Image (cartoon, helix red, strand yellow):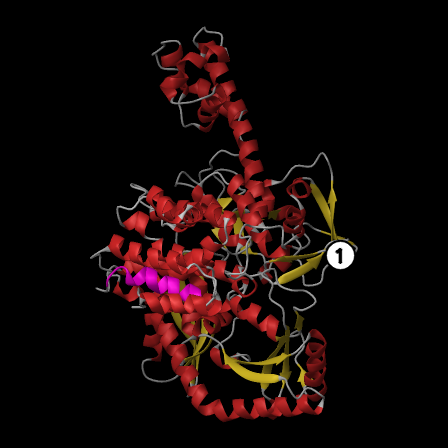
Amino acid sequence: MIRQYELVEKIKSYDPNADEDLINRAYVFAMQAHGSQKRASGDPYFSHPVEVAYKLTQYRLDASSIVTALLHDTVEDTDVTLDEIEAQFGKEIRGLVDGVTKLSRLEGKSENLKQAENFRKLLIAMSEDIRVLLVKLADRLHNMETLKFVKSPEKRQRIARETVEIYAALAERIGMRNLKEELQDLAFAELYPEARDSIVTRLNFLREQGEAEVEKTVKVLKEKLAEAGLPDAKVDGREKKPFSIWKKMEDKNTNFEQLSDIIAFRITVDDITQCYQALGVIHANWHTIPGRFKDYISTPKSNGYQSLHTAVLGPGQQRVEVQIRTQEMHEIAEYGLAAHWSYKQKEHSVKDGKQFRWMRELLEILEKSESPEEFLEDTKLEMYHDQVFCFSPKGDILAFPRGATPVDFAYAVHSGVGDTCVGAKINGRIVPLRTKLKNGDQVEIITSKTQTPSPSWERFVVTGKARAEIRKHVRTQQRNEYVNLGRAVLLKTFKQEGEEFNEKMIEPHLPAFNKKTVEDLLAEVGEGLISRQQVTEIVIGQKKPVSPTGMTSVLSTLSSPFRKKKANGAGPMPIKGLIPGMAIHFGGCCHPIPGDRIVGIVTTGKGVTIHTMDCETLENYTDAPERWIDVAWERDQADVKHIGRLRAHISHEPAALATVTNVIAKEMGNINNFKIINRSTDFFEILVDIEVQDLKHLNNIIANLRSKEVVQSVERYQT
């Protein structure tokens, strides 16, 4: 455990003016508060806050941040109160400790709801002082380092998944690459241990075999740069982390051997001019690989990252990825926000700078979301890594996740622009609103004051902000529909009972329904959550049953487009956008699963067949647009299984098939059908149908299969 004097000396090494007395008092206070408490590992509990504090010194954070790290668990895990914290250490420290404190104690709540509500508070706290996030990330990193001591496998899995989906994503957003990769790799070891072990084994083999090649490439690069007048340029090789390799195998639909950038070479020079000079040297000496050049210097990432990326057929005709940057850019690439925000900073709140735009958008999502779970879902969308850079007509640059559309662009400009969007021009040409944006596109949004958001937009937008805005509008429209329907139902019902319906007569009875306004009551009557009979019994004391035919006639004439639909009387329809009772089938050609973009095709005598948007079968219906139906998956599909079909080439060797089936089983996939369609002395080619929950579930199985040495290739299969 880090001793008191060691921690103080570390802080004083970069901040000689740090308040030594404050740090010493906090160290002693926290140690006494935690007393004899133990962690799951058996270590004294106080070792945890000390380790968190020491991690923050590596980022040269101020004394207040270090003190917060020492105290961050005292309020939750001991008898210490926030008032005591303020009395001992001041109002600033109280606010930081309150922001970082694990919120929890949400009795009777689901794990998802706890996670969502905790994250809501964390977001609000870190928007007021960004140091809250830095302390929280260091806290999570140490917890992940000791995760193996948590006894419950389910709890370890939940913590690891939360780490990847939220905390690593937050570290990415503030540009802290090292911290992000550490969190991802620790979570990877818990979530997919076999896949990680397989990748690590192959990396070790490559390292042994290719060490000489790496040194040779570094030497050649240095020589070429020196010849061009850059003798002081630094060149080194960097190996990708196992999680990054796994994600690339998943995203790029490739296997380990096909990856070209397992080793990336970094060139560090003195200034921006030399960056482009070094790029010229690389491109002049080796053939470039098309589509692999990216200029993040002239167009920085939203987290402040700057660098030139290129890929060439380097020495020995090997594919080589090269990154070129200045030393300042390198520090920002490694440490992100902490590189240009340190103990010297006096302002810690979210400013108007581009690096905090994402956080302001998360706060907007918080305001628009109806529930904590919805907020968490939209937030995860918003935190995905930016891949596409587009320009406004004025030349402003906006960054988006892959797959973003003009509607995402419109809402990124302003909520009002998104709400009134009727069309878009990309590079001067009018395009459909569901068109996917590409790097370098110039986007112009066409608006109309009479336009309102369409519910169908939610099916193709990819940013959390756009989805939250659309959902808010749909909820408002939905509520209005339910209020009108509820009013019509009660008008009809009261008339049947010989009473004239008046909303004022309901007001005295609202407490009986636990409602604040008449509209709230009407909305729930319209939605079917409160029966009309309950209302008549309480309001007019009428207890005789109401004719069911009356209710049927009201609902048939006043049906709402937002009513929950049933399919063949067998529970909720898995597909939105269809008429109740319509027969649906899933295309055996493409095997659509939740997460795929889908379309419905009306088939005579069969109802509607659901296909993926990229299914080749759809070419047969290009001349029959009247048969196409715009559909989407229902959100709640947790208990429904779907078939995903894979084609794989595996080595013809003992236990190869067992390896494949074991991977599928461990990922909770259920093999529905298995067929060997080709075989040779070296390989099997197989088709396997797997029951999965959604596209993410299937992609996890694919990525894990690709990590196995016996699997030469694996991909989704369409007939």
Between 411 and 691, the one nearer to me in the picture? 411
Q: Is residue 208 above or below residue 44?
A: below
Which kind of residue does numbered mark 1 sit on? Gly
The secondary structure making up most of the magenta span is helix
**Would you say residue 348 is visible in this rendering?**
yes
Between 7 and 535, the one nearer to me in the picture? 7
Residue at screen point 67% across, 69% down: 297
- Residue 155 is a magenta residue: no
Q: Is residue 567 above or below residue 702?
A: above
Residue 44 placement (x, y as % from top left): 24, 62
Would residue 378 appear left or right of 409 to someone viewing this image? left
Residue 530 placement (x, y as % from top left): 40, 24
The 10 Å Cα crowd at callout 1, few under 14, some 14 to 19, many 20 or more, is few
Residue at screen point 38% across, 82% down: 201
Q: Is residue 221 above or below residue 423?
A: below
Name the image quarter holding the N terminus.
Answer: bottom left
Q: Is residue 168 above or below residue 507?
A: below
Could you say which quadrant of the image residue 577 lies in? Answer: top right
Q: SS of the residue at dot 1?
A: loop
Between 159 and 75, the one nearer to me in the picture? 75
Residue at screen point 46% across, 74% down: 241
**Would you say residue 601 is visible in this rendering?**
no
Residue at screen point 40% across, 71% down: 675
Q: Which residue matches tag 1?
A: 395
- Residue 47 is a magenta residue: yes
Q: Which residues are magenta?
A: 44-57
Could you say which quadrant of the image residue 7 lies in? Answer: bottom left
Residue 173 placement (x, y as % from top left): 53, 59
Would residue 525 appear left or right of 560 to someone viewing this image? left
Instruction: Count the marks.
Output: 1
Residue 697 placement (x, y as % from top left): 42, 60
Q: Furthest residue to the right?
A: 428
